[in-house]
């Protein structure tokens, strides 16, 4: 396979990976993007598929292995999206593939809502062994994150006999009507779909970069204030606490911008729930399954939830979700809630293999590689005026882009178009990224990503940030920068 390599190459001074490392482990582009085959598929797709999908750039995937994606024209990309934080063990991990293939020869479907098969209790036991709250537990299986949230909403109301639910601004819990009612991330997600499920109240999430200035003490006070607002204001003015069934919270906001709250925020939510008999529901759909270096992001705060919603990375790309609760909470009677496909045998086989890989190596790798990446990224706000904030835990990392007045970092004006340009530039150079929130780039590679791959990805990203921050007259020709970032 031919790589776009100039006659001579000198890595920019900020590059960590050597030219040889870029050549060996970096992206390999052999056609313009999109290529001929990709363009044909996109043309047909645009006539047949729902226009509600949010395709950011023209990637048409053929196959994936590890942290690499190959498109239909033979171009190889370095994937730092993991299918939106889903492919936790990488694309087509051999152990996961083998588990799926073996199960496919035995049983494809028999609906665990009406019949029994051993994979359901086997994976439930595995989940219970790593749950972020003490057992005993009960487990419900669904197909998507939104289904797990719907289950948790219904369960919270059923168990408590209460109607109201508290969620947070910036949150994303799904697109089905119940989950969408909890969501407060982007107006387009809710536009023209009202009325929503009644009884949901949204309050502020402690997005420190957008909510306060100052050091760690100011951030702690801000986070505490976001939590205490519920009890000090909401419960004293418009929402009787005895009518609140649950507080739904992402331990780290995903779609909202990869926002990491101060631990005191979750700790105070736990205290509020305990004082008023409210259930604390942790949405770990994007942050869980080892992504932060622990099984569940909420563990970093020391808080134990009552219910946890899981999906995305738990089955390496197979559609599976979980709502797990303390056993006494999930006491509803048969017929109260079910799913025809939830707990599909193929998905459960994939999940068991996935948990083996995460437990054995991927979770520790996420902690090690993620910590090193964050340490490097923390230098960027000083070097690049348009980088406003770096935040994250493990391999759940956000790079916030701002308008970037060189003279001061006090101007935190969001720059969503600049963020999107950086993502596009990265794609043109073989690095797959996604945005999140108003103006943040998310880094959520497979948990098995190597240090070399991470070094290359950050080299490319920093090149793109430098290019995007220049005025048009100063821009480096596309081919030149592609050579510089890929060799």
Image (cartoon, rainbow, N blue to C red):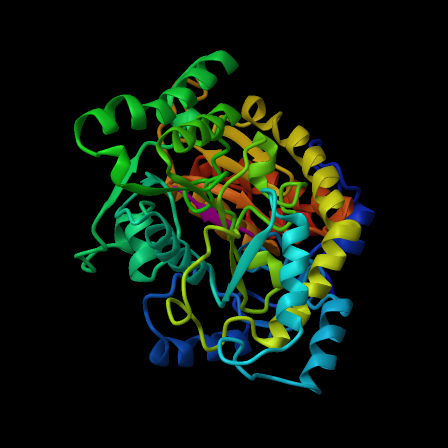
The secondary structure that most of the magenta stretch takes on is: strand
The mark tally for this picture is 0
Residue at 45 percent across and 35 percent down: it is 401
Q: Is residue 36 left or right of residue 191?
A: right
Residue at 49 percent across and 23 percent down: it is 264
Q: Nearer the viewer, residue 150 or 8?
A: 150
Classify residue 240 by image quadrant. Answer: top left
Q: Nearer the viewer, residue 210 or 307?
A: 307
> In this view of the protein, can residue 8 be seen by the observer?
no
Classify residue 50 by image quadrant. Answer: bottom left
What span is in magenta? 433-437
How far from the left and from the top, in percent, is residue 413? 35, 28
Q: Nearer the viewer, residue 352 or 169?
A: 352
How far from the left and from the top, in percent, is residue 358? 72, 53
Residue at 39 percent across and 61 percent down: it is 54
Q: Is residue 13 left or right of residue 274?
A: right
Q: Is residue 129 left or right of residue 214?
A: right
Residue at 17 percent across and 32 percent down: it is 238
């Amino acid at each position: 396979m031919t790589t776009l390599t100039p006659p001579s190459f000198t890595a920019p001074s900020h590059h960590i990976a050597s030219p040889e490392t870029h050549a060996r482990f970096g992206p390999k582009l052999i056609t313009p993007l999109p290529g001929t085959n990709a363009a044909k598929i996109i043309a047909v797709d645009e006539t047949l598929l729902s226009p509600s999908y949010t395709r950011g750039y023209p990637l048409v995937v053929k196959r994936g292995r590890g942290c690499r994606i190959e498109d239909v024209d033979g171009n190889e990309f370095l994937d730092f999206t993991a299918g939106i934080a889903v492919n936790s063990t990488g694309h087509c991990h051999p152990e996961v593939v083998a588990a799926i293939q073996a199960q496919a020869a035995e049983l494809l479907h028999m609906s665990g809502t009406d019949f029994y098969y051993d994979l359901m209790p086997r994976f439930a036991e595995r989940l219970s062994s790593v749950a972020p709250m003490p057992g005993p537990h009960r487990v419900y299986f669904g197909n998507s994150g939104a289904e797990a949230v719907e289950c948790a909403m219904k369960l919270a109301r059923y168990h408590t006999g209460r109607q109201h639910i508290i969620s947070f601004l910036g949150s994303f819990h799904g697109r089905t009507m119940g989950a969408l009612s909890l969501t407060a991330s982007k107006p387009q997600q809710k536009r023209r779909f009202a009325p929503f499920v009644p009884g949901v109240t949204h309050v502020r999430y402690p997005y420190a970069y957008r909510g306060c200035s100052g050091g760690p003490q100011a951030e702690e006070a801000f986070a505490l204030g976001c939590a205490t607002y519920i009890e000090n204001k909401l419960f004293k003015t418009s929402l009787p606490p005895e009518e609140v069934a649950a507080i739904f919270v992402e331990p780290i906001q995903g779609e909202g911008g990869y926002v990491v709250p101060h631990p005191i925020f979750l700790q105070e939510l736990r205290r509020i729930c305990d004082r008023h008999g409210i259930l604390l529901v942790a949405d770990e759909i994007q942050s869980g399954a080892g992504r932060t270096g622990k099984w569940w992001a909420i563990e970093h705060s020391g808080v134990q939830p009552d219910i946890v919603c899981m999906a995305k990375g738990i089955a390496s790309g197979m559609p599976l979700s979980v709502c797990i609760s303390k056993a006494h909470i999930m006491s509803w009677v048969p017929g109260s809630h079910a799913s025809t496909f939830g707990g599909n045998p193929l998905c459960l086989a994939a999940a068991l293999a996935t948990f083996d890989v995460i437990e054995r190596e991927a979770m520790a790798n996420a902690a090690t590689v993620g910590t090193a990446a964050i340490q490097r990224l923390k230098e960027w706000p000083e070097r690049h005026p348009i980088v406003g904030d770096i935040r994250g835990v493990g391999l759940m990392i956000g790079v916030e882009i701002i308008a970037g007045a060189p003279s001061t970092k006090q101007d935190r004006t969001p720059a969503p178009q600049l963020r999107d340009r950086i993502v596009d530039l990265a794609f043109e150079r073989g690095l797959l990224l996604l945005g999140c929130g108003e103006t943040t780039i998310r880094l959520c590679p497979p948990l098995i990503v190597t240090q070399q791959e991470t070094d290359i990805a950050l080299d490319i990203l920093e090149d793109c940030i430098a290019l995007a921050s220049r005025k048009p007259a100063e821009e480096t020709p596309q081919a030149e920068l592609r050579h510089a970032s890929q060799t």
